[in-house]
Image (spheres, rainbow, N blue to C red):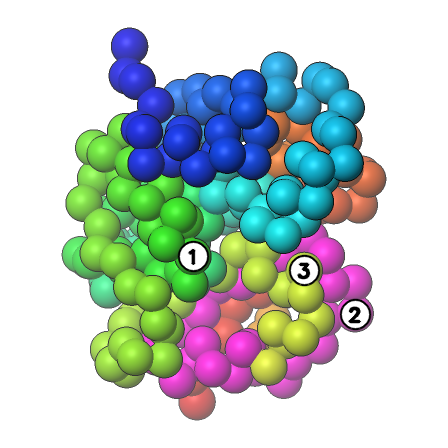
């Protein structure tokens, strides 16, 4: 039975003293991730815990619906990544990048500003027996990728201009999102609407369980 890595568990317990991480099997997938134990969600957080969580949200210990949907989609369609150089933008837990590596990508770089997210990507890559590269600065990367993967990044509308930036580092982009209902961009077309939920379950509205997948290709 694998043990939770201390580099993730210790900072998580600084937020929630009784926090536990579980190696969680993802439904509809053969992947596992170190995720916050659902039991930790079954109590009320006190004011200080709430403040700490809002200041430093541990988003890397959740598998968000868009990431799960994208991972499943790639597993079913490995031709999208097989033999390609892939960057997983805003990687979080690393679920999309790990799915790409399992599907035969030649190289996968997990990119996230948060050092704890990159630590989570490393731990989850080891849990799934894949090798990833790591980057903390998307704009420091060369324009050398075949595909940019993006899941659950557009929850903040201030990130919408990144839709153009993705094609500055990759020939194509796949964007999975369940938040933006008026998505419009001349380069992106919707490929599918997928069903997924966040783990552990946050009892999100039904609309957030419908994940749209958009594709763009550099002109």
Give the SS element for disc 1. Answer: loop
In this rendering, which labeled residue sits more in front, label 2 or label 1? 1
Give the SS element for disc 3. Answer: loop
Region rendered in magenta: 162-187
- Residue 187 is tagged as none
Query: Circle 3: is it few (<14), some (14-19), or many (20+) Cα within 10 Å?
Result: few
Give me the C-alpha separation between circle 2 and circle 1: 28 Å
Along the line of sight, the residue nearer the viewer: 215 or 119? 119
Give the SS element for disc 2. Answer: loop
Which residue has dot 3 on it?
155
Looking at the rendered image, the quarter that the C terminus falls into is bottom left
Residue 141 percent across, percent down from the top left = 28, 77
Q: State yes or no: residue 192 in magenta.
A: no
Residue 68 visible somewhere in the drawing = no
Looking at the rendered image, the quarter that the N terminus falls into is top left
Query: Circle 2: is it few (<14), some (14-19), or many (20+) Cα within 10 Å?
Result: few
Along the line of sight, the residue nearer the viewer: 31 or 75? 31
- Residue 114 is tagged as 1
Which residue has dot 2 on it?
182
Give me the C-alpha separation between circle 2 and circle 3: 12 Å
Along the line of sight, the residue nearer the viewer: 210 or 7? 7
Residue 74 percent across, percent down from the top left = 41, 47
Which residue is located at x 55 percent, y 77 percent? Answer: 163
């Amino acid at each position: 039975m694998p043990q939770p890595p201390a580099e993730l568990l210790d900072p998580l317990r600084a937020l929630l003293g009784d926090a536990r991480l579980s190696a969680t099997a993802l439904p509809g997938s053969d992947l596992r991730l170190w995720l916050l134990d659902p039991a930790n969600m079954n109590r009320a957080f006190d004011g200080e815990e709430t403040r700490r969580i809002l200041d430093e949200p541990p988003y890397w210990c959740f598998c968000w619906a868009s990431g799960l949907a994208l991972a499943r989609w790639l597993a079913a369609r490995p031709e999208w990544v097989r033999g390609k150089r892939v960057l997983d933008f805003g990687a979080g837990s690393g679920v999309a990048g790990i799915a790409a590596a399992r599907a035969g990508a030649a190289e996968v770089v997990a990119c996230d500003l948060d050092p704890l997210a990159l630590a989570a990507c490393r731990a989850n890559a080891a849990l799934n027996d894949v090798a990833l590269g790591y980057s903390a600065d998307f704009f420091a990367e060369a324009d050398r990728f075949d595909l940019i993967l993006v899941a659950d990044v557009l929850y903040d509308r201030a990130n919408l201009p990144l839709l153009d930036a993705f094609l500055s580092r990759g020939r194509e982009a796949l964007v999975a999102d369940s938040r933006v209902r008026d998505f419009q961009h001349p380069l992106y077309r919707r490929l599918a609407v997928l069903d997924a939920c966040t783990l552990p379950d946050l009892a999100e509205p039904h609309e957030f369980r419908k994940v749209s997948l958009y594709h763009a290709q550099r002109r």
